[in-house]
Amino acid sequence: MSKVQIICSVPGLIRNGVPHSTSEIYEEDHWTVGQLARFMSDPAFTVRTIDDEEAARGSAFDDAVAAEVNKRVSAKVEEIQQTFQNAVNAASRELVDEIGLKLKDAQAKITELEDQLSTATANADNTIDDLGKKLTIAEATVADLQKQLEAATAPQDGATGKAAPKK
């Protein structure tokens, strides 16, 4: 009597309402012709007709199939991880580039503001110097005017500094 072996390359995949392991052996009448056709049209499945003797040896074959499936799954996991890492690296480079441009812009703005501050400080210092010079001149003028006032109001040649009475 023959049997049907269904090999699934994605263990746990559900087809025909059943989750499938790596390899299972079923009685020939377990699946309908339509169900077997769906398995055969699905690239994740391999359907084999085997005899009782091969079914008995199926355990060793199952182990070999499981090893092959695990090898393929591990390779796929590694491929996906590498793809993910490449995507993360690319996104990181883009962010670093973007942050670098923003930093460069900020540094240029800081330099511009430093220049503006330097110019404003120089202008303020010049204004303070100019005002200091004007204050010195104004103080000298006040002192000179005070001397002139004192000289103008001081008694002259024996005068008492009082005005003569009017007649």
Image (tube, rainbow, N blue to C red):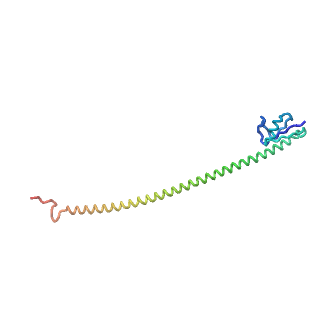
121 or 39, nearer to the observer: 39
Figure check: 94 above or below 62: below
Horizontal side, residue 14 vs residue 109: left or right? right
**Does 97 sit above or below residue 140?**
above
Residue 27 lies in quadrant: top right
* Residue 157 placement: quadrant: bottom left
Which residue is painted at 78% across and 40% down in the image? Answer: 11
Which residue lies at the image location 57% right of the left edge and 55% below the top edge?
Answer: 101
- Residue 24 image offset from top left, x and y in percent: 83, 38
Assign the C terminus to one quadrant of the image: bottom left
State the image coordinates of residue 146 (x, y, percent, origin top left).
25, 61
Q: Position of residue 35 (x, y in %)?
A: 81, 36
Query: In the visual, does 88 lie left or right of 121?
Result: right
Residue 12 left/right relative to 85 = right
Pinpoint residue 100: horizontal percent, then vertical percent.
58, 54
Viewport quadrant of the N terminus: top right
Q: Count all numbered tags in the image, as a single digit.
A: 0
Q: Residue furthest left?
A: 167
Q: Residue furthest bottom?
A: 157
Q: Is residue 105 left or right of residue 78?
A: left
